[in-house]
Image (spheres, helix red, strand yellow):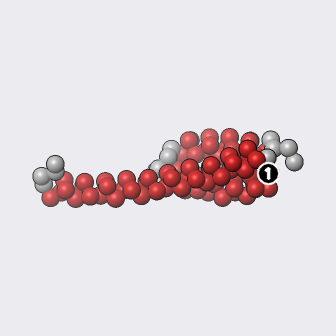
């Protein structure tokens, strides 16, 4: 257990930051899942709309440091390719 005042404050800050990051990561997963479900259903318009919502969410998470910038770019790229391949 933390003994000093500064260590106790650090523990509180880490807990708060962890909660925020967990929420952001969960949001990203939800948006990505919606895109994947639309792709699986073969609904091109729904997939495109879900992708347009998911892309800024992924990049925002990368900007906040929740996920790495390259990870976000890779996920966006792969989702875009999968959405594009749906037969119109």
Q: Quadrant of residue 17?
A: bottom left
Q: Residue furthest right?
A: 88
Residue 59 appears in the rendering: no
Tell me the residue that label 1 is attached to: 43
Percent across and percent down for residue 65 are 46, 50
Q: Quadrant of residue 9?
A: bottom left
- The one nearer the camera, 31 or 56, is 31
Q: Residue furthest left?
A: 3
Q: Report the number of numbered marks.
A: 1
Q: Residue at x 76, y 56 (%)?
A: 46
Percent across and percent down for residue 71 are 56, 41
Q: Is residue 5 left or right of residue 15?
A: left
Percent across and percent down for residue 72 are 58, 46
Q: Residue at x 79, y 51 (%)?
A: 43
Q: Residue at x 62, y 49 (%)?
A: 32
Q: Is residue 88 left or right of residue 26?
A: right
SS for tag 1? loop
Residue 5 appears in the rendering: yes
């Amino acid at each position: 257990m933390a003994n000093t005042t500064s260590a106790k404050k650090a523990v509180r800050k880490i807990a708060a930051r962890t909660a925020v990051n967990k929420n952001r990561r969960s949001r990203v997963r939800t948006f990505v899942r919606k895109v994947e479900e639309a792709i699986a259903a073969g609904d091109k318009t729904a997939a495109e709309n879900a992708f347009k919502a998911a892309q800024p969410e992924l990049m925002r998470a990368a900007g906040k440091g929740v996920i790495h910038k390259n990870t976000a770019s890779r996920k966006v790229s792969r989702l875009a390719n999968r959405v594009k391949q749906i037969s119109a």
